[in-house]
Image (spheres, rainbow, N blue to C red):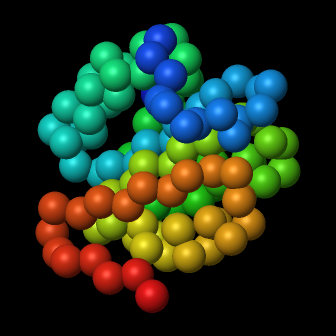
């Protein structure tokens, strides 16, 4: 499942998107957290970004593969760590090196995270 939200506040320092549409990919499997954060992102980023909401790690991985092929202007990847499918740490380990212009943000409500 994917939801697109048109969002108008530009995040300072996020000019690496180039001329393409600015996009945020947000992955969260827990419905109440997803809805709350989705609303917050919409309020915070206004019309400057299109937000793509994904419900698990596999959907996020598919979206990032598409970005590698088509370069649609994805600049920010916000992901939960613990989700069905591939987890957030693995998503970042797999895609961050291949997407140097994107910013990856990992969060978790369920455990401490250490990246090495």
Instruction: Tally the numbered discs.
Output: 0
**Left or right placement of residue 3 versus residue 35 in this view:** right
Which quadrant holds residue 82? Answer: bottom left
Residue 55 visible somewhere in the drawing: yes
Residue at 58% x, 36% y: name it.
14
Horizontal and vertical percent position of residue 98: 74, 66
Q: Residue furthest bottom?
A: 116
**Left or right placement of residue 15 versus residue 4 in this view:** right
Residue at 73% x, 47% y: name it.
67
* Residue 18 higher or lower than 93, as above or below: above
Which quadrant holds residue 36? Answer: top left
Q: Between residues 24 and 14, which one lies in front from this camera angle?
A: 14
Horizontal and vertical percent position of residue 87: 41, 70
Horizontal and vertical percent position of residue 77: 51, 49
Q: Between residues 88 and 43, which one lies in front from this camera angle?
A: 43
* Residue 104 higher or lower than 31, as above or below: below
Residue at 70% x, 51% y: name it.
101
Q: Residue furthest front?
A: 13
Residue at 77% x, 27% y: name it.
20
Identify the image quadrant of the C terminus.
Answer: bottom left
**Left or right placement of residue 3 versus residue 38 in this view:** right
* Residue 8 higher or lower than 108, as above or below: above
Horizontal and vertical percent position of residue 80: 33, 58
* Residue 89 higher or lower than 28, as above or below: below
Residue 83 visible somewhere in the drawing: no
């Amino acid at each position: 499942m994917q939801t697109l939200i048109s969002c108008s506040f530009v995040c300072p320092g996020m000019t690496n998107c180039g001329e393409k549409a600015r996009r945020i990919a947000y992955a969260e499997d827990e419905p109440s957290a997803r809805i709350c954060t989705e609303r917050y992102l919409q309020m915070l980023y206004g019309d400057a970004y299109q937000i793509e909401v994904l419900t698990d790690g596999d959907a996020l991985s598919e979206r990032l593969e598409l970005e590698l092929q088509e370069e649609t202007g994805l600049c920010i990847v916000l992901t939960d760590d613990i989700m069905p499918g591939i987890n957030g740490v693995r998503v970042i380990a797999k895609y961050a090196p291949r997407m140097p212009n994107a910013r990856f943000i990992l969060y978790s409500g369920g455990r401490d995270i250490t990246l090495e």
